[in-house]
Image: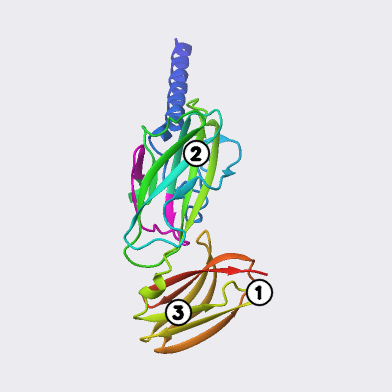
Amino acid sequence: MKYKILISIVALIITAILFDFKEEAHGSSNGAPTIVTGSPGDGNNTCAKSNCHTGSSVVVSPGWITSNIPAGGYTHGTTYTVTATATEASLVKFGFEISPQSASGTLVGTLVAGPGTQLTGGGKYITHSSSGTMGTMGSHTWTFSWTAPATGNTPFTFYGAFNCSNNNAMKTGDIIHTSTLAVIPSSVGIEEIADKATVNLFPNPINDALTLEYTLATASPVSVTMFDLQGRKIADLISEKEKNAGKYTATMDMNSYQPGMYFITLAAGNAVSSKKVMIVR
């Protein structure tokens, strides 16, 4: 009799464990957990690293996130369409999570859910809903909206992680991809702070040195920061707690930075302006 009771208890425990495991593996059909976009602000975490799904190594897949944001940058308060596409031959079930984040991991702008998607994490993340996981053979596409902030000129990146699932209701055999889309503010940002500062950068492209000319209309703290296209801070070029009104010129050595495209962001008080520059050798 004791053995029968023991066997029954063990059977119940195993059933509960299997039920919990299956629920955990299947739960992502209702949306990914937060903080799994692969962004630096999320600790580079994905569903693979958090052990939600296991399979091959995480695959970096450029171009899976696209938008109609102009190459020249976003305009304050404007709403744009963002498209996310997961592609993996022979698979039919897909999921994703995307977040538009600054270099520090702060949400930039406002996400608006579209068909088959939902917001999570207080609106910082967008992910698939239960109706948005089954695609055609080999791919699935989601569309949603993003509204640019009303003020500020922050370069940022859409960070996204995608799960391409074998739909076996278990953790194993899935393939996780990551993708990014770097976005800059419109160059009109330079004119937008004209009442507080005017800015001029040259030459562009840059070979070995960059000259920054700026004029402050009023006394204010000034900082000049260099970011890469993923919104990661590369260097603090200038940091002044307070500068008097007037015209200033600063020349900065660029020889220690790798060739490529960067953002130079000037902040004068609470006004910010960003400009894209190219370093060449």
Residue 113 lies in the magenta stretch: yes
Direction from residue 51 to residue 193 in the image, left or right = left
Q: Is residue 107 above or below residue 250?
A: above
Residue designated by label 2 = 86
Give me the residue at 47% from left, 20% from top. Answer: 10
Q: In this picture, which residue range is highlighted in magenta?
A: 99-119
Q: Secondary structure at mark 3?
A: strand
Along the polypeptide, which appears first: circle 1 or circle 2? 2
User: Where is residue 177 drawn, in percent x and y?
Assistant: 54, 42
Label of residue 137 in the image: none
Q: Is residue 52 visible?
A: no
Per the model, the C-alpha gap separating discs 1 and 3 is 22 Å
Q: Secondary structure at mark 1?
A: loop
Question: Which part of the image, by quadrant, shows the N terminus?
Answer: top left
Q: Is residue 63 above or below residue 182?
A: above
Per the model, the C-alpha gap separating discs 1 and 2 is 39 Å
Residue 38 lies in the magenta stretch: no
Q: Is residue 50 visible?
A: yes
Residue designated by label 3 = 199
As rendered, which of 244 and 20 lies closer to the eye?
Answer: 244
Residue designated by label 1 = 255
Per the model, the C-alpha gap separating discs 2 and 3 is 41 Å
Q: Amino acid at mark 3?
A: Val
